[in-house]
Image (cartoon, grey):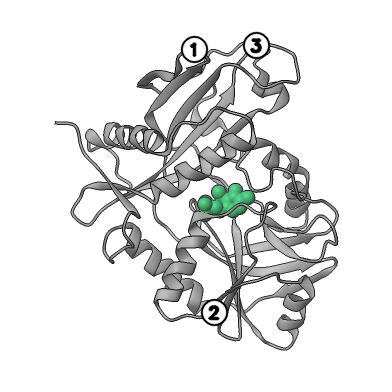
């Protein structure tokens, strides 16, 4: 494996980078035993048969959850149960035997405790990436019988990312009804790479996907949900089976409503947005995800038109700040949002 610094493009605007924490958690599933053999070991290459079925047929799921240092110096996972439940649902969709939500959360807690125990983690937050994949070494289009779980950690400082330039594509689609758009599966991202490259070639950072049928309804970005502020109202598409139900999206809606900001979850036609840019009804637009938190959108490229969006983003700024306060335990969170991590004695 090349050293982290040698990975081209690592650490870019859309990347989580390669600031891995020192260890990884592994577990295995065998039909007779179920999930077991949990271990936390130094991070390093996995030994895989080249016929490992996930590499060929894509039977794999992952997720991304974050741990934050709290004001009192302790660590907590943010909305761990929501992420574990989404991972369980992704497993169901991909015919992978899931771990129970409380089992998964317990593994994440022990991993965070392990990685933070030495006190060497300078950052105030790190990202956990659980990945589960079918590992039968077999060519065949049928579910694997054995699976492996790997949990990696990536150091992630809580900094605000620069505004995004977004390409709206009607040439490619990300997800179709009945497909896997609502699951967090590697194939969704692989299928989006060409659109992502086209975006880069056009001076953009991200793709905004439209619905597969009419290519009219706004869905989400490649790895973030999208929100618009239209005449003071936060508007975002409803979650369907073609959109990933972002936990950050849900947290922001909940925080915004608690703050008295009006929010609507409803279908948004692309022409509603382009028209609103014209008559100034679009106050701001932003994207949200666990890794990026809240990122303003600077421009939308629609066919050969580049629509510049308002540079001031007070709603996004405020929601970003409030979310950070909740994550760090500086503002009260709804019950169950913070899962404290007990350090080993
Ligand atoms: C396709 C997609 N949509 C939305 C999101 C945002 O989800 P979350 O806020 O749970 O990270 C992500 C990131 O995980 C994603 O990959």
How far is mark 2 from mark 1, CA to CA?
58 Å
Residue 44 coordinates in the image, percent (x, y)? 45, 20
* Between 278 and 179, the one nearer to me in the picture: 179
Which numbered tag is attached to residue 137?
A: 3
Q: Residues within 10 Å of mark 2 (few under 14, many from 20)?
A: few
Rendered position, 239 above or below 316: above
Location of residue 207 with respect to 341 vertically, above or below: below
What residue did someone put label 2 on? 312
**Percent from the top left, x then y, of residue 266?**
65, 71
Question: Which label belongs to residue 32?
Answer: 1
Tell which tag, 2 or 1, sits nearer the viewer: 1
Tell me which label, 2 or 1, sits earlier in the chain. 1
The alpha-carbon separation of the residues under discs 3 and 1 comes to 18 Å
* Label 2 residue near ligand 1, CB within 8 Å: no
Q: Quadrant of the N terminus?
A: top right
Tag 2 and tag 1, C-beta contact below 8 Å = no
Picture layout, residue 331 above or below residue 133: below
Residue 286, by quadrant, is bottom right
Element marked by disc 3: loop
Q: Nearer the viewer, residue 112 or 31?
A: 31
């Amino acid at each position: 494996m090349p050293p982290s610094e040698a990975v081209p493009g690592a650490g870019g605007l859309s990347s989580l980078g390669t600031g891995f924490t020192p260890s990884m958690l592994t577990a295995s599933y065998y039909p007779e035993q179920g999930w077991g053999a949990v271990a936390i070991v130094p991070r390093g290459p996995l030994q895989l048969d080249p016929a490992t079925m996930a590499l060929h047929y894509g039977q794999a799921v992952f997720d991304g959850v974050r741990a934050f240092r709290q004001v009192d110096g302790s660590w907590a996972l943010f909305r761990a149960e929501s992420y574990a439940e989404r991972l369980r649902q992704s497993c169901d969709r991909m015919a992978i035997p899931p771990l129970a939500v409380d089992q998964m959360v317990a593994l994440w807690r022990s991993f965070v405790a392990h990685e933070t125990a030495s006190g060497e983690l300078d950052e105030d937050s790190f990202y956990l990436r659980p990945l589960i994949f079918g590992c039968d070494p077999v060519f065949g289009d049928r579910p694997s019988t054995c699976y492996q779980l790997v949990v990696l950690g990536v150091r992630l400082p809580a900094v605000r990312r620069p505004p995004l330039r977004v390409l709206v594509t009607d040439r490619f689609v990300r997800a179709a009804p009945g497909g896997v758009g609502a699951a967090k599966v590697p194939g969704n991202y692989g299928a989006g790479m060409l659109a992502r490259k086209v975006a880069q070639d056009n001076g953009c950072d991200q793709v905004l996907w439209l619905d597969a049928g009419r290519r009219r309804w706004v869905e989400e970005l490649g790895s973030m949900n999208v929100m618009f502020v239209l005449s003071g109202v936060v508007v975002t598409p409803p979650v369907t089976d073609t959109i990933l139900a972002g936990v950050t999206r849900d947290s922001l809606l909940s925080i915004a409503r608690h703050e008295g900001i009006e929010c609507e979850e409803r279908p948004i036609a692309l022409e509603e947005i382009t028209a609103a840019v014209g008559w100034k009804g679009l106050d701001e637009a932003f994207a949200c995800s666990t890794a990026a938190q809240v990122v303003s959108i600077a421009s939308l490229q629609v066919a050969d038109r580049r629509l510049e969006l308002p540079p001031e983003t007070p709603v996004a700024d405020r929601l970003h700040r409030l979310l950070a306060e909740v994550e760090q335990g500086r503002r009260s969170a709804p019950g169950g949002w913070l899962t404290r991590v007990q350090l080993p004695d």
